[in-house]
Amino acid sequence: MDFIFELAIILLASKIAGDISVKLGQPSVLGKLLVGILLGPAVLGLVSNTSTLEELSQIGVILLMFIAGLETDIDGFKRSWKASTSVGLSGIVVPFFIGFIAGVIMHMSTFEASFLGLLLSATSVSISVQALKELNKMQSKEGTAILGAAVIDDVVVIIALAFLMSMAGGDVNLSMIIMKKVLFFGVAILAAWKLVPWILTKFASLKVTESVITGALIICFLYAYIAELMGVAAIIGAYIAGLALNLTKLKHVVFKKAETISYSLFVPVFFTSIGLQVSFEGISQHLSTIVWLSILAILTKLIGAAVGAKLAKFSWSSSLGIGAAMVSRGEVALIIAAIGLESHLISQELFAILVIVVLVTTIATPPMMKYFFNRSQSEKSIKVTA
């Protein structure tokens, strides 16, 4: 029963913290992230990051990206592919090379420095999605460019990681990895076009309660599971499932039900669980390294992705807002860090440092997005009234 009590604490604290954050002029997600640190082992120790909580958190991030797919402007998504490609690739190249140089300065080997560069190139827009929703930017040109860039980022970084692992002597078949990704996207798109609408229609005709949302969740979880199986992040699979259901006539029904289920339980657990991973043990010994790596991680992604957005003809304020949305490394970078630790490409000490750095980038993302996008909106208002 301890877990039930912890769950009640998480839900209560995340809603109160989110409300306080909004009243202070920040996105609610920032309060939810910070309250996780407060509740967790780092401060009060009221909630522990158990395996059950991690599973609920995983469902939360999957549902969050699923909803993002349902909300995406499909026509805008098609129009923004050039911008997404520019943002995604520029947001990889700059962090990679600066991260590589940082690794060399830290006396790492070529492979270790390359791994650090790749880790800093990763992105996870699951946190950014919530900030986009609160800023009413989900269906904007900036929002569609960010979501498209995240898909490109995930695919390119994972393939580059596989290439690096094969070069480092790991048992990795690069051609097989690329083929699996191509196969996944090919089958996922074909299923979205032909199979998903048929499945949802069949579920809608069932004489049972909530059959439509049940069918939609089955599709979402299958897409996420198969994506993970094929070497693509589960959140990308969930996002594509949302896009697939976005094309159906029942998308509004699915969206309303999915949002209720997600934001009442799973999404608050996801946001709070990020803060639960923070540990201040031994942090004083590596504080300077954590600070300069965090600054490096934020600036390289911010500037890299912003330059890509500017090349796609966004204003500088919008470009910086897009860059800010790509800053969060989230669970994608944590997975890559774990792979590096298992492969002995990074030490246990550096792994602990990188976990803190990833969390810093995640917490820094929402307020930066709000600042730059509000600035962009103000500039547009001035131009209209001028």
Image (spheres, helix red, strand yellow):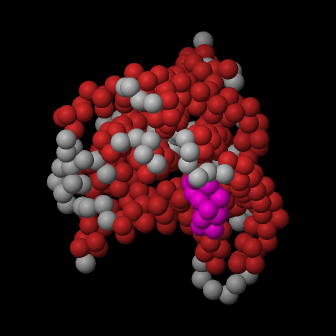
Please state the extent of the stretch shown in magenta in the rendering.
Answer: 220-239
Q: Quadrant of residue 164?
A: top right
Tell me the quarter of the image containing the N terminus: bottom left
Residue 102 lies within the magenta run: no
Front-most of 188 and 338?
338
x and y percentages locating residue 307 in the rendered image: 60, 21
Q: Which residue is painted at 35% across and 42% down in the image?
A: 347
Whether residue 235 is visible, yes or no, is yes
Left or right side of 170 for 185: right
x and y percentages locating residue 96 in the rendered image: 54, 29
x and y percentages locating residue 265 in the rendered image: 41, 65
Whether residue 372 is visible, yes or no, is no
Front-most of 312 and 180?
180
- Return the residue found at the far top: 386
Task: Classify 158 as above or below 220.
Answer: above
Q: Which residue is painted at 65% across and 74% down in the image?
A: 215
Q: Which residue is painted at 23% across and 73% down in the image?
A: 2
Task: Classify 320 as above or below 220.
Answer: above
x and y percentages locating residue 131 in the rendered image: 48, 42
- Return the residue found at the far bottom: 207
| Dominant secondary structure (helix, strand or loop) of the stretch shown in magenta | helix
Front-most of 381 and 17?
17
Left or right side of 75 for 8: left
Left or right side of 246 for 41: left
Tell me the quarter of the image containing the C terminus: top right
Q: Which residue is painted at 31% across and 32% down in the image?
A: 290
